[in-house]
Image (tube, helix red, strand yellow):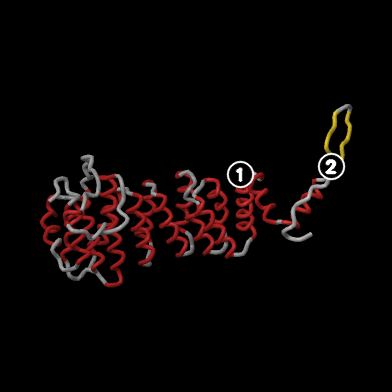
Amino acid sequence: MGANAPLVFKQGRMKDHGGCSQMNVDWFQILSETIRISPRLVIILCVLFLPFPALAQTNLDDLRNKIAVGSTEEKRSALFEIRSLHTEEASRIAVPALSDKIDIVRATAVSSIIFLPHDESLRLLLPLLKDGSEFVRRETAFALGELGEPAAAHDLIENLNRESSIENRSAAAIALGKVGNPEAIEPLAVILKTKPTESQGFLRGAAARSIGEIAQAIRFGKHQPTTPQNFLPDKYKKAFGENDGTTLPTVFDTAVPVLAKVLESSRESNDARREAAFALGAIANPGSTDLLRSCAAAQEYYLAEICKEGLLKSPTPK
């Protein structure tokens, strides 16, 4: 039969069952002819009649099997897919990978379980801040930041102080900004009190940024993903958000002179100075207004724009 030939149904046989007539159709023969005629039709029928939950369950079962017995790359691929699903059910499948013997599998798994209930995610992730692998510890810090649970601050502060590598300390500093707990302000400020060096430029910028992120989350209830927000003329710039009058804890006042010193220093990296300006704007201490106004005229374009936007965050925009 040709590929484009019309489908011909064979005549069914009528059977008499106690006075009731019933058509006896050879469905197997029909299906086999259908497959020969148009495989696409079979796919369409499957999509129409196979329940979507069954398809989803089949996929989850496949991911579960890859994590259990797959190769390293199969496990990682499954974990990436689990992460993209953003569901508790999928995240639960990733839990066994947290104890995988391969470092890179554990490191990939940590960000795949953050869609579990927060208390459960914390219970699973916090011990991995002491994992034997530097890479796993770093990825765990990033995952805790994405989780955004303030209760993680204590362990992240310990991690910040315990780690020796700049990369891991920076990851902890960034995560502390995202979890938004003011307990982190003092240990972050300690980083900025040390003498600036080229190797610590990124860490210092991360510490300053996180101080600002915590202040901004308290004042406005949200984080700012990019700095500056835009490069539009001043008349088109808008305030970051409505301040509900929340007063920042006094620990932020102790961070202001530290941040001001970073912003004023020519020995600091451009990134560190920009992030210090961002933090000063987020804290909106009246004592830093003049400094922000002065730096708003800086030749360094990014710094100038950040200072302009920082002034808009003060209770009475300047």
Q: Residue furthest top?
A: 19
Quarter of image, res 16: top right
Mark 2: which amino acid? Gly
Quarter of image, res 65: bottom right
Mark 2–mark 1 Cα distance, whole angstroms, equals 35 Å
The residue identified by callout 2 is 12
Left or right: residue 149 compared with residue 192: right
The foreground one among 74 and 100 is: 74
Q: Residues within 10 Å of mark 2 (few under 14, many from 20)?
A: few
Of callouts 2 and 1, which one flags the residue occurring earlier in the amino acid sequence? 2
Which mark is on residue 53? Answer: 1
Residue at 46% over, 64% down: 135
In the figure, 16 relative to 148: above or below? above
Residue at 10% over, 56% down: 290
Q: Position of residue 70 (x, y in %)?
A: 63, 61
In the figure, 80 relative to 180: above or below? below
The foreground one among 294 and 258 is: 294
In the figure, 272 relative to 43: above or below? below
The foreground one among 318 and 165 is: 318
Q: Position of residue 147 (x, y in %)?
A: 42, 50
* SS type, badge 2: loop
Q: On the rendered image, what quadrant is the N terminus found in?
A: bottom right
Which mark is on residue 247? Answer: none
Which is in the foreground here, disc 2 or disc 1?
2
Left or right: residue 272 compared with residue 61: left
Q: Position of residue 286 (x, y in %)?
A: 13, 50
Quarter of image, res 75: bottom right
Q: Residue furthest bottom?
A: 198
Mark 1: which amino acid? Pro
Residue at 55% over, 53% down: 94
* SS type, badge 1: helix
Q: Position of residue 224 (x, y in %)?
A: 30, 53
